[in-house]
Amino acid sequence: MILKEKLLNKINMLREIEKRLDPLFGKYISSALFFSKLKSQDREEVKEYFFERVKACKAHMEVLESIAKELSESKDNVY
């Protein structure tokens, strides 16, 4: 079992990690690919892969936000 406060802290920690990954996947990967010596087609494939990760990251953030909200509003203290 885990107390509500500890669970919320862990969820918030995960939310922070997801927030930090978003710019890494977007801006920095695009810049790195721009300067890479990859062929155009390979660059596009890598870019597509990372943009899929950005979508997954945003979906995770939404789920974590929903869970955090539900926990905050809950009267239960042990999970």
Image: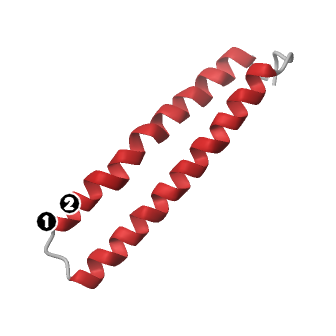
Placement of 15 over or under 40, stated as above or below: above
Q: Is residue 15 left or right of residue 46?
A: right
Please determine whether, in this image, residue 9 is positioned above or below residue 19: above
- Looking at the rendered structure, the secondary structure element under dot 1 is helix
The residue under the point 48% across, 64% down is 52
Q: Is residue 43 left or right of residue 66?
A: left
**Mark 2: secondary structure:** helix
Q: Which percent across, then down, holds residue 54?
A: 46, 56
Position of 13 relative to 49 (above/below): above
For the point 27% across and 61% down, which residue is it? 30
Spatial CA distance of label 1 from label 2 is 5 Å
Q: Position of residue 67 (x, y in %)?
A: 72, 34
Check the picture and name the quadrant holding the C terminus: top right
Report how many numbered discs are placed on residues in the image.
2
Q: Is residue 27 left or right of residue 53?
A: left
Q: In the rendered image of this protein, does residue 43 appear above or below residue 27?
A: below
- Quarter of the N terminus within the rendering: top right
Q: In the picture, residue 14 is in which quadrant?
A: top right
Q: Residue at x 40, y 71 (%)?
A: 48
Q: Residue furthest right?
A: 75
Residue named by callout 2 = 32
Find residue 44 and report its image quarter.
bottom left
* Residue position for label 1: 35
Q: Residues within 10 Å of mark 1 (few under 14, many from 20)?
A: few
Residues at marks 1 and 2 touching, judged by CB atoms closer than 8 Å: yes
Q: Residue flagged by tag 2: what amino acid is it?
A: Ala
Q: Which mark identifies residue 58? A: none
Q: Residue at x 57, y 42 (%)?
A: 61
Q: Colour scheme used in the picture?
A: secondary structure
Query: 14 or 54: nearer the eye?
Result: 54
Type of residue at label 1?
Answer: Phe
